[in-house]
Amino acid sequence: QVELVESGGGLVQPGGSLRLSCTASVPIFSFIVMGWYRQAPGKQLELVAMFPAGSPPHYADSVTGRFTISRDHAKKTFHLQMNSLKPEDTAVYYCRAEDIRSPGDYYWGEGTQVTVSS
């Protein structure tokens, strides 16, 4: 059973930064795709950033230039560095990974709350 555990959420003022982490129970080379999603109250789940298979990182237009996705194979972790945060970034953030052995099988973290407010 693969588990993903997020950490790093919290309350931050507009213009501030947070770094989210998603730690896997297996080596992250087990995943063909890794990404971050978010869901704000009353809104649909949306893609924030991802590592597509064999391609450079992809970002939602709303976060391009402010957020950076990265990965650390040694720590079985991928991160989302969020800078210049805005109130509209407030949401529950989820990490997701797709199993390289069975494409189409996805694993999700439990979510971490990010609140941007003064």
Image (spheres, helix red, strand yellow):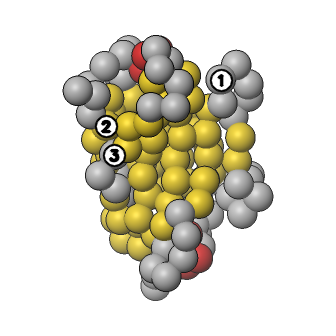
Q: Could you tell me which secondary element the residue under label 3 belongs to?
A: loop
Position in image of residue 33 (x %, y %): 56, 29
Marked residue nearer the N-terminal end (3 or 1): 1
| Closest to the observer, 87 or 84 | 87
Q: Is residue 32 above or below residue 41?
A: above
* Image location (x, y in percent) of residue 22: 37, 39
Q: Which residue is mark 1?
A: 53
Seen at 70% across and 47% down, the residue is 59
Any part of residue 31 in sight:
no
Residues under numbered marks 3 and 1 in contact, where contact means CB atoms less than 8 Å apart: no
Q: Is residue 117 or residue 110 the one in the foreground?
A: 110
Which residue is drawn at the image coordinates 36% and 22% (left, top)? 76
Helix, strand, or loop for circle 2?
A: strand
> In the picture, which quadrant includes the N terminus?
top left
Query: Which of the two discs, 3 and 2, labels the residue nearer the N terminus?
Result: 2
Q: Is the residue 29 above or below the residue 91 in the image?
A: above
Q: Amino acid at mark 3?
A: Gly
Q: CA distance from mark 2 to mark 1?
A: 19 Å
- In the figure, is residue 1 to the left or right of 57? left
Q: Dot 1 lies on which element?
A: loop
Residue, disc 2: 4
Camera-side residue: 77 or 107? 107
Question: Distance of mark 3 from mark 1, alpha carbons?
Answer: 20 Å
Image location of residue 95, percent across then percent down: 43, 45
Question: Which residue is labeled 3 in the image?
Answer: 109
Q: Are the residues tagged 3 and 2 within 8 Å (C-beta)? A: yes
